[in-house]
Image: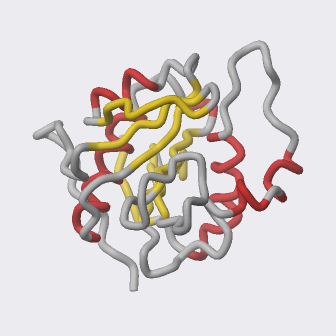
Amino acid sequence: MIHFRPLLPSDQALLWHWLHVALWDPPPAPPRPLAVLENPSVRIYAEGWGKPSDVGVVAVIDGMDAGACWMRLVPGGQGLAYVDNETPQLGIALDAPFQHKGFGKPLMLAALQAARVQGYKRVSLTVHSENPAASMYKACGFVRLGLRGTYHLMATASAEPTDPASPSPPARYP
Protein backbone atom coordinates (compact mmCIF):
# COMPACT_ATOMS: atom_id res chain seq x y z
CA MET A 1 0.00 0.00 0.00
CA ILE A 2 1.30 3.46 -0.91
CA HIS A 3 0.65 6.74 0.83
CA PHE A 4 2.44 10.06 0.93
CA ARG A 5 3.84 12.35 3.57
CA PRO A 6 5.64 15.70 3.34
CA LEU A 7 9.39 15.73 2.74
CA LEU A 8 10.61 17.39 5.93
CA PRO A 9 13.88 19.11 6.90
CA SER A 10 14.51 16.09 9.15
CA ASP A 11 14.64 13.99 5.95
CA GLN A 12 17.84 15.75 4.79
CA ALA A 13 20.00 12.59 4.82
CA LEU A 14 17.34 10.67 2.86
CA LEU A 15 17.07 13.54 0.39
CA TRP A 16 20.81 13.39 -0.30
CA HIS A 17 20.41 9.66 -0.97
CA TRP A 18 17.43 10.21 -3.30
CA LEU A 19 19.23 13.01 -5.14
CA HIS A 20 22.05 10.57 -5.82
CA VAL A 21 19.56 7.97 -7.10
CA ALA A 22 17.93 10.63 -9.31
CA LEU A 23 21.23 11.30 -11.15
CA TRP A 24 20.43 8.68 -13.77
CA ASP A 25 22.83 7.70 -16.54
CA PRO A 26 21.99 5.16 -19.25
CA PRO A 27 23.13 1.59 -18.76
CA PRO A 28 25.70 0.17 -18.64
CA ALA A 29 26.98 3.22 -16.73
CA PRO A 30 27.31 2.58 -13.01
CA PRO A 31 25.84 4.98 -10.46
CA ARG A 32 27.79 8.20 -10.21
CA PRO A 33 30.29 8.45 -7.36
CA LEU A 34 28.86 9.93 -4.16
CA ALA A 35 31.36 12.78 -4.52
CA VAL A 36 29.07 14.23 -7.21
CA LEU A 37 26.88 15.45 -4.33
CA GLU A 38 29.67 17.88 -3.38
CA ASN A 39 29.32 19.69 -6.72
CA PRO A 40 27.63 23.09 -6.17
CA SER A 41 25.53 22.59 -9.32
CA VAL A 42 24.12 19.40 -7.75
CA ARG A 43 23.89 20.61 -4.14
CA ILE A 44 21.45 23.38 -5.11
CA TYR A 45 18.65 20.79 -5.37
CA ALA A 46 18.85 19.52 -1.78
CA GLU A 47 21.09 21.60 0.46
CA GLY A 48 19.28 23.13 3.43
CA TRP A 49 15.95 21.46 2.60
CA GLY A 50 12.91 23.07 4.15
CA LYS A 51 12.94 26.60 2.72
CA PRO A 52 9.47 28.17 2.55
CA SER A 53 9.37 27.65 -1.23
CA ASP A 54 10.47 23.96 -1.10
CA VAL A 55 7.82 21.35 -1.89
CA GLY A 56 8.29 17.61 -1.59
CA VAL A 57 6.50 14.39 -0.86
CA VAL A 58 7.80 11.02 0.29
CA ALA A 59 6.29 7.78 -0.98
CA VAL A 60 5.70 5.43 1.93
CA ILE A 61 5.19 1.88 0.66
CA ASP A 62 4.28 -0.85 3.11
CA GLY A 63 5.55 1.36 5.93
CA MET A 64 8.92 2.13 4.31
CA ASP A 65 10.14 5.47 2.94
CA ALA A 66 10.65 4.32 -0.65
CA GLY A 67 11.41 7.51 -2.55
CA ALA A 68 10.55 11.15 -2.97
CA CYS A 69 9.56 13.79 -5.45
CA TRP A 70 10.72 17.28 -4.57
CA MET A 71 11.02 20.69 -6.15
CA ARG A 72 12.78 23.89 -5.37
CA LEU A 73 13.02 27.38 -6.79
CA VAL A 74 16.57 27.89 -7.98
CA PRO A 75 16.80 31.54 -9.10
CA GLY A 76 19.25 33.36 -11.29
CA GLY A 77 19.49 30.93 -14.18
CA GLN A 78 21.00 28.16 -12.05
CA GLY A 79 20.12 24.53 -12.59
CA LEU A 80 19.75 22.40 -15.68
CA ALA A 81 15.94 22.70 -15.59
CA TYR A 82 15.88 26.48 -15.07
CA VAL A 83 12.96 28.11 -16.90
CA ASP A 84 12.37 31.25 -14.84
CA ASN A 85 12.51 32.45 -11.25
CA GLU A 86 8.92 31.35 -10.56
CA THR A 87 9.18 27.75 -11.80
CA PRO A 88 10.56 25.18 -9.38
CA GLN A 89 12.87 22.45 -10.64
CA LEU A 90 11.78 18.92 -9.82
CA GLY A 91 13.67 15.80 -8.81
CA ILE A 92 12.21 12.34 -8.34
CA ALA A 93 13.68 9.05 -7.17
CA LEU A 94 12.53 5.68 -5.95
CA ASP A 95 14.85 3.21 -4.28
CA ALA A 96 15.71 0.25 -6.51
CA PRO A 97 13.29 -2.29 -4.95
CA PHE A 98 10.39 0.07 -5.74
CA GLN A 99 11.33 1.04 -9.31
CA HIS A 100 9.37 -0.20 -12.35
CA LYS A 101 6.38 -1.18 -10.20
CA GLY A 102 3.99 1.67 -10.95
CA PHE A 103 4.85 3.87 -7.95
CA GLY A 104 6.49 6.73 -9.89
CA LYS A 105 3.34 8.17 -11.44
CA PRO A 106 1.32 8.42 -8.21
CA LEU A 107 4.39 9.92 -6.51
CA MET A 108 4.75 12.52 -9.26
CA LEU A 109 1.03 13.35 -9.23
CA ALA A 110 1.05 13.80 -5.44
CA ALA A 111 4.00 16.17 -5.75
CA LEU A 112 2.30 18.16 -8.53
CA GLN A 113 -0.77 18.55 -6.36
CA ALA A 114 1.42 19.76 -3.49
CA ALA A 115 3.01 22.26 -5.92
CA ARG A 116 -0.41 23.56 -6.91
CA VAL A 117 -1.38 23.97 -3.24
CA GLN A 118 1.88 25.92 -2.74
CA GLY A 119 0.80 28.22 -5.60
CA TYR A 120 3.15 27.10 -8.36
CA LYS A 121 1.76 27.51 -11.88
CA ARG A 122 4.21 25.12 -13.54
CA VAL A 123 7.11 22.82 -12.70
CA SER A 124 10.19 21.91 -14.75
CA LEU A 125 12.62 19.00 -14.91
CA THR A 126 15.28 17.52 -17.12
CA VAL A 127 15.46 13.90 -18.17
CA HIS A 128 18.21 12.08 -20.04
CA SER A 129 17.17 11.37 -23.62
CA GLU A 130 17.54 7.60 -22.99
CA ASN A 131 15.65 7.52 -19.67
CA PRO A 132 12.43 5.50 -20.04
CA ALA A 133 10.84 7.59 -17.25
CA ALA A 134 10.28 10.35 -19.83
CA SER A 135 7.07 8.63 -20.94
CA MET A 136 5.76 8.70 -17.35
CA TYR A 137 6.60 12.40 -17.12
CA LYS A 138 4.62 13.00 -20.30
CA ALA A 139 1.68 11.03 -18.86
CA CYS A 140 1.80 13.36 -15.84
CA GLY A 141 1.44 16.46 -18.03
CA PHE A 142 5.03 17.38 -18.85
CA VAL A 143 5.89 18.54 -22.38
CA ARG A 144 9.30 18.92 -23.99
CA LEU A 145 10.56 22.49 -24.22
CA GLY A 146 14.01 21.83 -25.65
CA LEU A 147 17.27 19.96 -25.33
CA ARG A 148 20.03 20.83 -22.88
CA GLY A 149 22.99 18.69 -23.79
CA THR A 150 21.72 15.10 -23.65
CA TYR A 151 18.79 16.09 -21.41
CA HIS A 152 15.27 17.01 -22.44
CA LEU A 153 13.96 20.09 -20.67
CA MET A 154 10.33 19.42 -19.78
CA ALA A 155 7.69 21.46 -17.97
CA THR A 156 4.06 21.21 -17.08
CA ALA A 157 1.64 23.64 -18.66
CA SER A 158 0.46 24.09 -15.06
CA ALA A 159 1.01 22.31 -11.78
CA GLU A 160 -2.48 20.81 -12.13
CA PRO A 161 -2.21 17.02 -12.43
CA THR A 162 -3.68 15.49 -15.55
CA ASP A 163 -5.00 12.38 -13.79
CA PRO A 164 -8.39 12.98 -12.14
CA ALA A 165 -7.77 10.04 -9.81
CA SER A 166 -4.55 11.57 -8.50
CA PRO A 167 -3.94 11.29 -4.76
CA SER A 168 -4.56 14.04 -2.25
CA PRO A 169 -1.53 16.15 -1.36
CA PRO A 170 0.08 15.60 2.02
CA ALA A 171 -0.42 18.17 4.74
CA ARG A 172 2.00 21.09 4.49
CA TYR A 173 4.61 21.10 7.21
CA PRO A 174 5.05 24.26 9.31
- Left or right: residue 84 versus residue 31 is left
Would you place residue 90 above or below residue 126 in this image? below
Q: Nearer the viewer, residue 107 or 42?
A: 42
Q: Quadrant of the N terminus?
A: top left
Q: Quadrant of residue 76?
A: bottom right
Q: Quadrant of the C terminus?
A: bottom left
In this view, the residue in front, 145 or 23, is 145
Task: Looking at the picture, tell me which residue is in the foreground, 28 or 58.
Answer: 28
Residue 174 vs residue 120: left or right? right
Q: Is residue 102 above or below residue 67?
A: above
Dividing the picture into quadrants, the one containing residue 163 is top left
Q: Nearer the viewer, residue 148 or 26?
A: 148
Residue 92: % across, % down: 51, 44
- Residue displayed at 63% across by 59% down: 15
Q: Residue furthest top?
A: 28
Q: Is residue 161 shown above or below 171?
A: above
Specify whether 61 is left or right of 159: right
- Pinpoint residue 13: horizontal percent, then vertical percent: 71, 64
The residue under the point 58% across, 16% down is: 130
